[in-house]
Image (cartoon, rainbow, N blue to C red):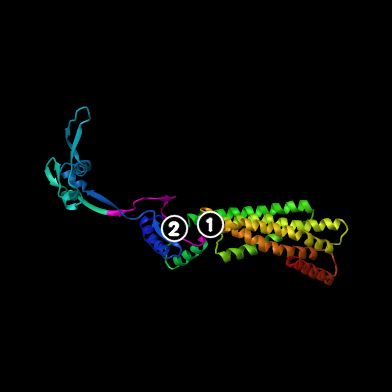
Amino acid sequence: MLSSPDYKLLQKEGAKVEGAMNQTKGIVSVLKTWDMDKVVYNLDIDETEAMNYGVNRSDVTAQIQMMLRGVPVATFPKENSMDYTVRVWLPQNQIDDFSTILNTLIVTPKGKIPLSKIAKLDSNKEPSTITRDGLNYTLEIYGNREKGAISHIMANLEEQLAKIEINPQVEIEQIGEQKQFKASAERMIGAIIVAVFLILFTLIGMFHSVKISLMILFSIPLTIIGASWTMLAIGYHVSMPAMMGFMLLSGIIVNNAILLIHFALEQIKLGMNKRDAMLESIKIRTRPVLMTAFAVSVGMLPVAQGSAIGLERLAPLGAVAIGGLVVGTLMTLIFIPVGFVWWMRGRLWGKKFRLLLSCFSYTLRVLLF
């Protein structure tokens, strides 16, 4: 949307922006909300000259309207119906001819005179529609998105706009789908932050430990790795369904970490040392964690393919769920046990490092065999 106090300047600068959008890859059918295509005829009457002939502006315009719009001259009666009115006016070719109008005789108290004696007729073009935003005129230029991510299209558009020089009196604002996406993305990011804090407070209430709760939350960024690479490999772009997929992953992947750590803590309460407790948790909990992840991934395959009509809009959600679950679950089974051992109480770094290696190698053996 372009805005300026001068609508003529909007038309000039709008043509530049329209040309830039036509050169942008991924944008088709570029159009403007209005153009300078409305012809307006102006009748300039010399008041002093008209008074010399004893007529005023209203007398002149009334006679011209009779010629252009017609005047009733008779009626044609019809039985049991309203009478037909007979109107007479100039032919269209004479109405469109300036010379005919200016040579038309105007009746005055001093006789008939041509209109050109007391008036001038000219024409100019104005906007077909006038739109405003506040005190400024506005011109909106739309382009339909053919294919590709809207972020990529906007980046291409910015490159094209950088090649043209826009008058400082004209302001440019992104509207339409781009503006809606930015507003929705801001709300979605806020919702994700609130969700993470709610998960954190819930975990603190369950485990009575801030350290363990933060360690479980560490599994959430692990899903972003797999989800991002999956979207890049398939060719999907960041969208609202994709961001909804990230929120879905947050709850599932946190559940996997809870299963591992909760089982290890239960074994520690029974008297098992922390190293053996985590190794036992890996041995017992790995299979159900993998079963859950792969079952959800298989169920999301039709969504990720987007084969059904209308389902293509949710395809990024399915891709994020599959990639994030598969990669995130595998990384969770490796890094969460390692992190649990790392945060074990111990004074000797060498002993702690050996515990890490043993936990890491045991996890790999469970995953591979």
Q: Position of residue 325 (x, y in %)?
A: 66, 60
In this rendering, the answer to whether 203 lies above or below 228 is: above
Q: Position of residue 12 (x, y in %)?
A: 36, 61
Above or below, 367 relative to 179: below
Q: Spatial distance from mark 1 to mark 2, Cα to Cα? A: 23 Å
| Range shown magenta | 124-150
Say if the magenta span includes residue 99.
no
User: Can residue 34 be seen in the rendering of this structure?
Assistant: yes
Instruction: Tell me the element at label 2.
Output: strand
**Side of 337 where 194 appears, left or right:** left
Q: Are marks 1 and 2 in contact (CB under 8 Å)?
A: no
The kind of secondary structure element at disc 1 is: loop
Mark 2 neighbour class, 10 Å CA radius: few under 14, some 14 to 19, many 20 or more? few
Q: Is residue 144 magenta?
A: yes
Q: Position of residue 352 (x, y in %)?
A: 82, 69
Give the numbered dot on residue 80.
none
Q: Quadrant of the N terminus?
A: bottom left
Residue 217 seen from this side: no
| Residue plotted at (37% across, 50% down) | 130
Q: Which residue is mark 2?
A: 144
Q: Residue at x 45, y 65 (%)?
A: 25
Residue identifier under label 1: 307
The quarter in which the C terminus is drawn is bottom right
